[in-house]
Image (tube, helix red, strand yellow):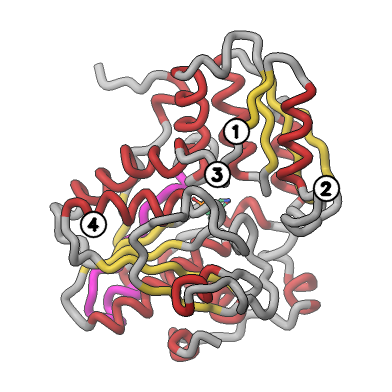
Amino acid sequence: MQIRLGFSGTVGKTPLIRIRSLSEATGCEILGKAEFLNPGGSVKDRAALGIIEDAEAKGLLAPGGTVVEGTAGNTGIGLAHVANARGYRTIIVIPDTQSQEKIQYLKAIGAEVRAVPAKPYRDPDNYNHVAKRLAAEISGAYWANQFDNTANRDQHIKTTGPEIWQETDGRVDGFVSAVGTGGTLAGVSTYLKSRKSSVRTVCADPHGAGIWSWIKRGNLDFNAGSSITEGIGQNRVTANLADAPIDDAYRIGDKPIVEMVYAMIRREGLFLGSSAALNLCGAYRLAKELGPGHVIVTILCDSGSRYLSRLFNPEWLATKNLVPTAKDLSFTESLFADV
Ligand code: PMP
């Protein structure tokens, strides 16, 4: 029999999908890891499972315990599913700027959701610090701490990286990923470079984030603008990101991201969230920079269905001046400027 053991056994081993339109336009193989097909619907199922298994192995989480986390949504969803399957309670602290769909989902699967005003990391009321304090107050509670708990990155070293290596028969030349915690970019980059040091690893950063500046200039000083993307956009060097072998970074604005979301629906039948579209913008640019014949892998983090009220709401897009207009892929010309 070929069976998977429950939710946890179903996380990972996602298909690697060839993106035909972008591959043909670049002469490269542009491949997207279909993380939206994880059982909780995003790449964060991997980190959630890795963090909970690590806590159990270290005796930090025991039957009847509570998992507490500050999260923009997808990690919370992954944690709540894994916690349900293993008999833990889940409390999620979420910034109130996040999409209603994710909050409704969390509540539907029984997580206790505490929405707090969005505050910068340096503010003691930032959602992360609230989660940390809450876990300290509740007996038997464990703070998942996805940003600085390197069990997150380790899960990508153990699973995502090796899957990409095997699925490409070691032919992968480049890897592109956005950064939220940095677990995906750091973990996959670390693994792929351990197999083939020439693999080029690139961060695709949205406006408002500082990782582009950190990689290109060695400091976090430049983070101009803002972005409609969710779950990404980091302004500090997390423990997961520290020492990651990253070669380059691209700064990509919302306009091409939204065009890419709609291009993927029309051209590929793929319904993706904005971080996946950012990743594909980055993969396209890397393919053009490396030239024809290369194999570029990126992450299709989650599905567009998580963003119906925003990314797929024409009125909301109009308020941001982001209504898609492209008839072809010429919007990709704007990807090379780091604007
Ligand atoms: N895309 C989405 C939709 C996410 O929720 C996240 C994680 N918050 C990421 C990308 C980034 O992944 P990571 O935390 O591994 O950097």
Picture layout, residue 95 above or below residue 45? below
The answer to whether residue 25 is magenta is yes
Q: In this view, does 242 lie to the left or right of 180?
A: left
Number of dots carrying numbers: 4
The answer to whether residue 96 is magenta is no
* In this rendering, the label closer to the viewer, 3 or 1: 3
Residue at 67% across / 36% down in the picture?
Answer: 69
Task: Measure the alpha-carbon separation of dots 1 and 2.
Answer: 18 Å
Residue at 78% across / 30% down in the picture?
Answer: 134
Say few, some or many: other residues with alpha carbon within 10 Å of mark 3 (under 14 / 14 to 19 / 20 or more).
some
> Mark 4 sits on what residue?
193
Q: Quadrant of residue 8?
A: top left
Tell which of 136 and 267 is nearer to you: 136
> Mark 3 sits on what residue?
148
Say few, some or many: other residues with alpha carbon within 10 Å of mark 2 (under 14 / 14 to 19 / 20 or more).
some
Amino acid type assigned to the residue bearing label 2 in the image:
Asp
> Mark 1 sits on what residue?
144
Q: Give the range drawn in magenta.
A: 21-37
Q: Is mark 4 on a helix, strand or loop?
A: helix
Q: Which of marks 2 and 3 is nearer the N terminus?
A: 2
Q: Earlier in the sequence, mark 1 or mark 2?
A: 2
> Mark 2 sits on what residue?
125
Q: What element carries label 3?
A: loop
